[in-house]
Image (cartoon, rainbow, N blue to C red):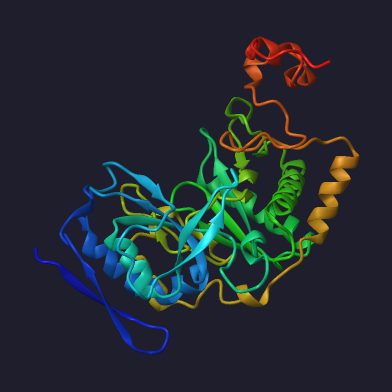
Amino acid sequence: MADAQVECPTPDGGTRAVRISSPDRVLWPQDGITKLDLAHYIRDVGPAMLPRVGGRPMTLQRFPTGIEGEEFYSKNPPKGLPAHVRTVLMTYPSGRKHPQLVVDEIATAVWGVQMNTVTFHPWPVRATDAEGALDRPDEVRIDLDPQPGCGFREAVEAAYVLREVLAQAGLTGFPKTSGNRGVHVFCPIEPAQEFLDVRHGVIAIARELERRMPDEVTTAWWKEERGQRIFVDYNQACRDRTIAAAYSPRPLPGAPVSTPVSWESLRDVAPGDFTVRTVPDLVGAQPDPWAAYDDAVGDLGVAMSWWERDVDEGLPEMAFPPDYPKMPGEPPRVQPSKKRYEDEDYLPGGTGYLRAHPERPPRT
């Protein structure tokens, strides 16, 4: 098939055409959904999606030959950026910096589809002119991830208890399906803390949820310690960690979509209800379940006080992602079943450290 053109509305009330090459390329083989189908989907849900992702640096999860083929996460903007697309310089945990795509209009997201993007991963910051804006999240994002032996229904029940915890912290949670088996809960916050502090606030919230549901919820980083429970993935609050955007498709059979829902309907929905084929009509037929989002901005202060309380009571820092540099106060990065020494012996100069690094002399 020849290249196709997808007309997209622009913020000034006009239209912008986006070229889609290889429009008949099948991205979801089991479902027959093509690249052009996906471009039309993003165009159609764009008015609902844009308020959730607009102005945010974006990582693109790309599948050049469809979801069953090669995939990669594109942080550097792809070559051939259209003139209307802007970028912003982002800093990563290693300290390196490079430009990243910003979605300011629907046509930019559709151009992402032209680059074979299936899932959009926005950062929890906005690329504004405010000083430090790129270092201060304006969203708390909590990922309720079912471990083997439990599933979506268990994640839903945990989400309702999480809602109560968030309210106690002065925050308003907005749920969405993850597009897989889990539930995401987002909270708008004042962009007052940098990433590490926000992560600590999320850990405090996760621990409070775990206290209320110890048999159903866990904050254990190591999979062997989680059991058949819902893992609260606190490290999704780290710099350079992102969660699938609202209304973003996922690379799974059925073409599921991570979809905002209301608290009133969460218990009545199933992940399979929301797909690339069904979501446009659902968006057009019902009010925006997150319509109150921008008016519900909260303060992370209470959650931060919980973190300080837990520290005072002896609870430690928690593990960071393995690609992070070693962080202050972090426990040893050793799987519990393989641990042979006390924690302090894994520090430089300790027994375990020296066995792993025999070329390094002990501290004097």
| Picture residue at 85% right of the left edge, 53% below the top | 305
* Quadrant where the C terminus is found in the figure: top right
* Residue in view at x 61 percent, y 40 percent: 231
In the picture as drawn, the residue positioned furthest to the right comes out as: 312
Percent of width and height locating residue 279: 37, 66
* Camera sees residue 260: no
Q: Position of residue 38 (x, y in %)?
A: 28, 63
Q: Position of residue 213 (x, y in %)?
A: 71, 42
Q: Quadrant of residue 46?
A: bottom left
Q: Is residue 243 above or below residue 223?
A: below
| Residue depicted at 64% across the width and 14% down the height | 357
Q: Residue at x 67, y 65 (%)?
A: 132
Q: Is residue 128 above or below residue 341?
A: below
**Residue 249 on image: x %, y %:** 38, 57
**Left or right: 190 in relation to 306:** left
The answer to whether residue 191 is seen in the rendering is yes
Which quadrant of the view contains residue 171? bottom right
